[in-house]
Image (cartoon, rainbow, N blue to C red):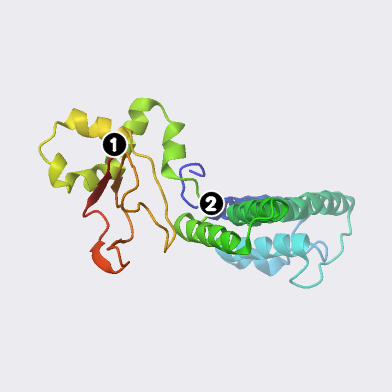
Amino acid sequence: WELQSVRPHYYSIAKLFAAVLLVNHWLTCIYFALAYLQGFGSSRMMPQTFVLNETFWSQYLTGFFWATNVVTRVGGSVAPPETQLEFSYMLVICFLALFITAFIIGGVSETVYNVNASRNEWRAKIQRIKTFMQNKRIPSKIRSRVLEYYNHLWSRRQGERDDHSILQELPPHLGNEISVIINGEIVGKVPLFKNCPQGFIKLLISCFKPHIFAPGDWIVRNGEAGSEMYFISKGEVEILDEAERVCTVLKAVSYTHLTLP
């Protein structure tokens, strides 16, 4: 479940909470076992005799509150043990509470780190890029454009890897199948490929490589040699005339642009 979930940190928190509840449940059961063994009301630590007349859930709630309070000490003071058996049980709980505390702190810390892992890795990457540009004495104007591009990249992906790199790790047949699911709609809306065989469409999609352009970037200029066909999956592309006035705006999944040498 944790591997299949799109938000594994939620599952980790739920798993941690369930483990703590299970430990408290065991402590509750042992607590009432001692009460039946020694007798209710036999000491200040044991449940009083009136608890025997309560319903099962009331008794369980009494024991569960005691177990939780012993471990966390947030519900008030706990009556001290009086018998050797009670002392032994409390010693076990004291050592167990240390492990529970370490387990909770470690689990929460790991969950918080995993939640922010992508952001932390992205910040480290941006810092490396800044250091590189500073060492190479890149002009400030170019630096700003580079950082704007990476900011745009973060807004699009939120630190996630691009589709192409993920598909490259899969077996070819499985990667192609997923690529057809992702990009089939884009190709299907292009009149040039509407009547093409399915095998050709799959071969064409297998050659796709994602490119992300920041706002204001030039994709191709008039007169430049090119050998690429662009499929717009997200965003818009402006076609400018020689005076750099907008002639046409191409929408996502609605047009392809071909550049030839």
Residue 161 horizontal side relative to residue 201, left or right? right
Residue neighbourhood size for the residue with mark 2, other residues' Cα within 10 Å, grouped as few (<14), some (14–19), many (≥20): some
- Picture quadrant of residue 32: bottom right
- Residue 140 image position (x, y, % from top left): 62, 63
Question: Residue reaching furthest bottom?
Answer: 76
Q: Which residue is mark 1?
A: 205
Residue at (21%, 34%) from the top-left corner?
201
Q: Which residue is mark 2?
A: 11
Residue neighbourhood size for the residue with mark 1, other residues' Cα within 10 Å, grouped as few (<14), some (14–19), many (≥20): many
- Residue 255 image position (x, y, % from top left): 22, 53
Provide the secondary structure element on which disc 1 rests.
helix
Q: Nearer the viewer, residue 91 or 149?
A: 149
Looking at the rendered structure, the kind of residue marked 2 is Tyr
Height in image: 250 above or below 26?
below
Q: Is residue 48 visible?
A: yes
Looking at the rendered structure, the kind of residue marked 1 is Ile
The quadrant of the image that shows the C terminus is top left
Residue at (31%, 67%) from the top-left corner?
243
Residue at (73%, 50%) from the top-left corner?
103
Residue 84 horizontal side relative to residue 189, left or right? right
Q: Are marks 1 and 2 in contact (CB under 8 Å)?
A: no
